[in-house]
Amino acid sequence: MEIELERRFEARACIAHMKGDLDLGTVPRVRQRLSDELGRGWTNVVLDLSEVTYADSSAFSLLVWLDRELEPRGGKLVLAGANTNVGRVLELSGLVGAAPTIAAADDVSSALSGLEVANGEEPPMWIESMVLPAAVDTLSAARTRVCEVLEPLAIAESSLFDIRVAVGEALANAIRHGSPEGDRDTVAVEVGAYPDRVIIRVSDSGNGFDGCAAPNEDLYASSGRGVMFMRALMDRVDFESCADGGTVVTLTKHVASGQR
């Protein structure tokens, strides 16, 4: 196993370019190299798997360890460029798309586009706002409307689906937990388009929530995974409790060049 490390300050990321087999003999060495890098303060990790030809169950332990290291930092692990066979093995772990810190990307460039930190100073190209009653029967129409608003950006179908699910979870939480007066309350949605990303804010009038959901150990529980889904599907999720009550959930999804 050959390992070459690359550092990208704009994405706060360490990239591990690997070549060869990811197995019981090589995982400890990869883990030690990454541990040293995390100790230097990196927040995000990209594993470049484009030249990894074999992965076994030992790779799962690496993913679990990275998930536990990055979650308290608010960081992310992106698995980039895995071939079909390696991708199948990694999918068996059930962690990709389920653990809030772990995501997959077609290549390193796509992975980095989702991690780069925008300065936030440039104005949006446009903003569209909507207000809806805090009622569950408005959810479908609201999700559809957000996607319609984003249509001119020609966002990739997979990314648009991610946004649809994340917005749906944010809206469901706002209605279920952030509307003490039921459908007499309202939920506000603001969609902003920037050259490299879209930012969607969902606001409610509840008692405030900081995004720290208690972990649910019951795999068959009927609820309690909304925040996990949002963090897994979006590039950044922020929660802000408003001074006058309520919560604003800010969902950020980067848009790769050519998808605008």
Image (cartoon, grey):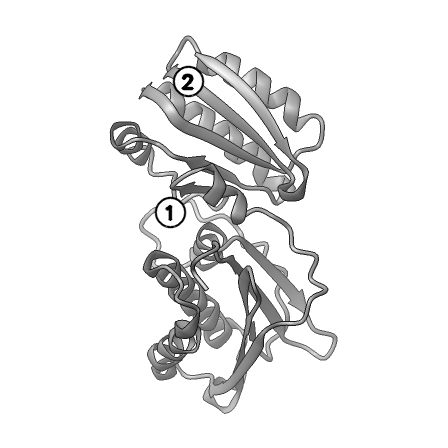
CB of mark 1 within 8 Å of CB of mark 2?
Answer: no
> Label 1 is placed on what type of residue?
Asp
Residue at position x 35%, y 77% in the image = 144
Q: Quadrant of the N terminus?
A: top left
> In this view, which residue lies farthest toward the top?
25
Q: Picture coordinates of residue 52 (x, y %)?
A: 37, 22
Circle 1 or circle 2, nearest the eye: 2
> In this view, which residue lies farthest toward the front?
258
Q: Picture coordinates of residue 70 (x, y %)?
A: 58, 37
SS at mark 1 in the image: loop
Identify the image quadrant of residue 34. top right
Distance CA(mark 1)–CA(mark 2): 38 Å
Circle 2 Cα neighbour tier, 10 Å, few/some/many (<14 / 14–19 / ≥20): some
Q: Is residue 241 left or right of residue 102?
A: right
Q: Mark 1 highlights which residue?
A: 218
**Compared to 126, does 15 lie above or below?**
above
**Compared to 225, does 127 lie above or below?**
below
Q: Mark 2 highlights which residue?
A: 19
Q: Picture coordinates of residue 235 (x, y %)?
A: 52, 53
Q: Is residue 6 left or right of residue 244?
A: left
> Label 2 is placed on what type of residue?
Lys
